[in-house]
Image: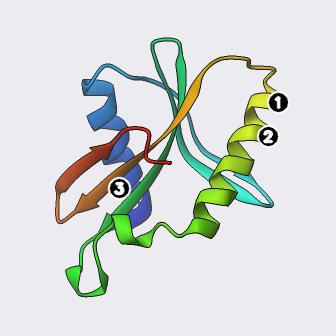
């Protein structure tokens, strides 16, 4: 298991303990990827997981560019359309810096 997969597993475990229900991980499209898809009540939650072990290059949150946000939104839209889901959704970020987990609900 590589570092990214470890971070996604850690994020999934953390969010499950917070009451979210796991749906799917690593949904890939040519134009973007969804790290985690979970449910929080009636909401579909698309979660971007960022893990940083070295603080010299900025924290985990600083690794999310406007282009990355655009790709995630496009991938989420494709997923919702393919699955014929019409429900409220939101975009969360799990930032892991040296085992410190920060959950940002409605990040973008």
Q: In the image shown, does 4 or 51 lie closer to the viewer?
A: 51
- Residue 88 screen position, x and y as percent: 60, 21
Q: Residues within 10 Å of mark 2 (few under 14, many from 20)?
A: some
Q: Residue at x 29, y 79 (%)?
A: 58
Q: What residue would you read off at disc 2?
A: 78
Q: Residue at x 24, y 49 (%)?
A: 102
Q: What residue would you read off at disc 3?
A: 7
Q: What residue would you read off at disc 1?
A: 81
Which residue reaches farthest bottom? Answer: 56
Element assignment for label 2: helix
- Residue 17 screen position, x and y as percent: 25, 25
Quote the CA–CA distance across marks 3 and 1.
28 Å
Q: Residue at x 75, y 39 (%)?
A: 77
Contact (Cβ within 8 Å) of mark 1 with mark 2: yes
Element assignment for label 1: helix
Q: Is residue 52 left or right of residue 5?
A: left
């Amino acid at each position: 298991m590589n570092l990214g997969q470890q971070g996604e597993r850690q994020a999934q475990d953390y969010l499950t303990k917070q009451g979210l229900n796991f749906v799917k991980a690593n949904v890939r499209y040519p134009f973007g990827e969804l790290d985690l898809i979970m449910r929080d009540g009636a909401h579909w939650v698309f979660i971007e997981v960022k893990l940083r072990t070295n603080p010299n290059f900025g924290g985990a949150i600083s690794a999310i560019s406007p282009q990355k946000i655009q790709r995630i939104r496009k991938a989420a839209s494709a997923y919702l359309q393919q699955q014929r889901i019409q429900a409220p959704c939101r975009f969360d970020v799990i930032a892991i810096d040296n085992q410190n987990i920060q959950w940002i609900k409605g990040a973008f």
